[in-house]
């Protein structure tokens, strides 16, 4: 039985054999104001709203895939490609996107691209570029996901890498150096490092693989059709999945496009959401930035959830667009807490303390870390300058970390003015339940993480 969780490893948040694709830009979420002010108030009759020119900026960086193994205690060891799959890249494509998160938790996408599986260079990583489209200057966040199963769908169990912090987007100012590392679990299939996943057949499964019951119907797209396939899929009521799915080749119609799908699933499987998606950005991948839909009744209203029993379910038509967006792919979570100096104040630190760093690291830290290496190995860093901590007995901190993954939480007081932390004799603290500062992150807000700075032995 194939679990939805990656080999029971907590990793969280593109297609094998696909053709090469140029950088694609998703403009579906381009937020432009093209309305005219029709207010008839006497003080406003001569004014009209002029549409704002969209802000378009190119961002660039390198995306890398780092393999790891995890022992029975949950400790991770990072391994090279040469010691694992060699020169073979067994996964699907890499999806990269820019987004913002709304107040209600919804995610809006402002540009995306992929690195096709055939083009991935595991040892050195791959350059990427995304064209960002905003209605005005602002900030976006970035994440990348590996199609681990090679099923052409970015699901909720895919390994995700995030760029630490937000990226400021200013008209006319392209941004470089936005590197992202995705931590991916290595699994020695049959002792040979074999293929991963189903490789994207027309009918797929991440459940038990049984096919006692079929769900069939039409997929109706009500948008201008520019090519590309659609898929029907089973998603749980929390938005996780897909568990089972079936592809559909669409044919253009006057109102959009239509096609049929078939999903084979398990008898008495339970209650699910029946969702659908169309590859609207043309990258041969179903990803969160695509156009999504749902099982609909004859009035075009979302008719989810569905109950899967012992009988086939024909005539379960899917309407695209319909519903509240894609799968529950939440790349970031928020980790927050407090830091003190063991009953004293931060004035008890050495006089030459230049800064205090609270950091979420990708790797277990080593001694004597340069600040350049610290930033390179960090998911996020919060820096407190002397003016921030002078006279204080406690500091509040908050970090953005990848959801459903593992991070190493540390705090360092940098003294000696040589821009190196974690030296003997300096003050430091670790979070989590072990000496390595390891924390398993969730998909929401984790508060109350307290650390106390203490002096490392000479």
Image: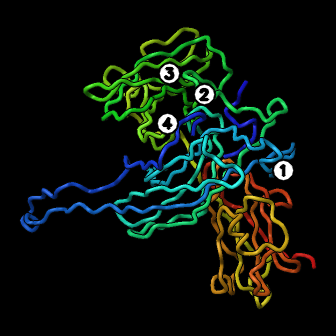
Disc 2 versus disc 1: distance between alpha carbons? 28 Å
Would you call the spot at circle 1 few (<14 residues within 10 Å), some (14-19), or many (20 or more)?
few
**Which residue in the rendered view is the most extreme toward the bottom?**
351
Q: Where does the image place residue 45, in percent across and percent down from the top left? A: 8, 63
Secondary structure under tag 3 reads strand
Say which quarter of the image contains residue 241. Answer: top right
Residue ID for mark 3:
306
Residue 20 in sight in this render: yes
Residue ID for mark 1:
75
Would you call the spot at circle 2 few (<14 residues within 10 Å), some (14-19), or many (20 or more)?
many
Callout 4 touching callout 2 (CB < 8 Å): no
Residue in the picture at 47% in, 50% down: 23
Disc 4 versus disc 2: distance between alpha carbons? 20 Å
Callout 2 touching callout 1 (CB < 8 Å): no
Q: Where does the image place residue 415, in percent across and percent down from the top left? A: 78, 84
**Which residue in the rendered view is the most extreme toward the right?**
458
Residue in the picture at 60% in, 28% down: 243
Residue in the picture at 12% in, 65% down: 47
Residue ID for mark 4:
284
Q: Which residue occupies the foreground of this view, 97 or 22?
A: 22
| Mark nearer the N terminus (3 vs 4) | 4
Residue ID for mark 2:
243
| Mark nearer the N terminus (4 vs 2) | 2
Q: Which residue occupies the foreground of this view, 110 or 91?
A: 91
Would you call the spot at circle 4 few (<14 residues within 10 Å), some (14-19), or many (20 or more)?
many
| Mark nearer the N terminus (2 vs 3) | 2
Secondary structure under tag 4 reads loop
Q: Where does the image place residue 209, in percent across and percent down from the top left? A: 66, 19
Disc 3 versus disc 4: distance between alpha carbons? 28 Å
- Report whether 140 appears left or right of 180: left
């Amino acid at each position: 039985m194939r679990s939805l969780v990656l080999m029971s490893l907590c990793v969280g948040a593109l297609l094998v054999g696909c053709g090469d694709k140029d950088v694609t830009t998703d403009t579906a979420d381009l937020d432009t104001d093209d309305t005219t002010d029709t207010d008839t108030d006497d003080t406003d009759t001569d004014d009209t709203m002029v549409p704002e020119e969209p802000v378009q900026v190119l961002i660039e960086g390198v995306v890398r895939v780092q393999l790891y193994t995890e022992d029975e205690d949950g400790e991770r060891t990072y391994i090279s490609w040469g010691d694992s799959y060699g020169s073979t890249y067994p996964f699907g494509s890499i999806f990269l996107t820019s987004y913002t998160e709304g107040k209600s938790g919804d995610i809006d996408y402002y540009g995306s691209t992929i690195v096709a599986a055939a083009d991935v260079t595991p040892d050195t990583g791959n350059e990427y570029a995304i064209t960002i489209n905003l209605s005005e200057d602002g900030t976006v966040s970035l994440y990348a996901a590996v199609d681990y199963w090679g099923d052409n769908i970015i699901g909720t169990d895919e390994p995700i890498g995030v760029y630490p912090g937000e990226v400021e987007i200013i008209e006319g100012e392209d941004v470089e150096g936005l590197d992202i590392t995705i931590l991916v679990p290595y699994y020695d299939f049959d002792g040979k490092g074999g293929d991963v996943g189903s490789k994207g057949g027309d009918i797929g499964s991440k459940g038990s693989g049984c096919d006692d019951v079929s769900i069939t119907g039409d997929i109706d797209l009500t948008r201008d059709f520019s090519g590309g396939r659609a898929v029907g899929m089973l998603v749980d009521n929390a938005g996780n999945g897909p568990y089972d799915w079936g592809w559909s080749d669409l044919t253009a119609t006057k109102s959009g496009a239509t096609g049929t799908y078939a999903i084979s699933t398990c008898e008495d499987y339970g209650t699910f959401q029946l969702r659908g998606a169309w590859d609207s950005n043309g990258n041969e991948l179903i990803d969160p930035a695509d156009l999504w839909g749902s099982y609909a009744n004859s009035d075009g209203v979302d008719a989810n959830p569905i109950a899967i029993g012992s009988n086939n379910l024909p005539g379960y038509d899917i309407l695209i667009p319909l519903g509240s967006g894609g799968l529950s792919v939440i790349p970031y979570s928020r980790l927050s807490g407090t830091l003190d100096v063991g009953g004293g104040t931060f004035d008890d630190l050495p006089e030459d303390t230049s800064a205090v760093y609270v950091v979420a690291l990708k790797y277990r830290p080593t001694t004597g870390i340069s600040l350049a290496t610290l930033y390179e190995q960090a998911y996020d860093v919060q820096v407190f300058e002397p003016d921030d901590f002078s006279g204080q007995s406690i500091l509040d901190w908050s970090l953005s970390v990848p959801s459903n993954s593992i991070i190493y939480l540390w705090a360092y007081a940098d003294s000696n003015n040589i821009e190196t932390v974690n030296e003997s004799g300096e003050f430091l603290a670790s979070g989590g339940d072990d000496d390595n500062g390891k924390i398993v992150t969730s998909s929401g807000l984790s508060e109350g993480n307290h650390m106390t700075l203490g002096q490392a032995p000479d």
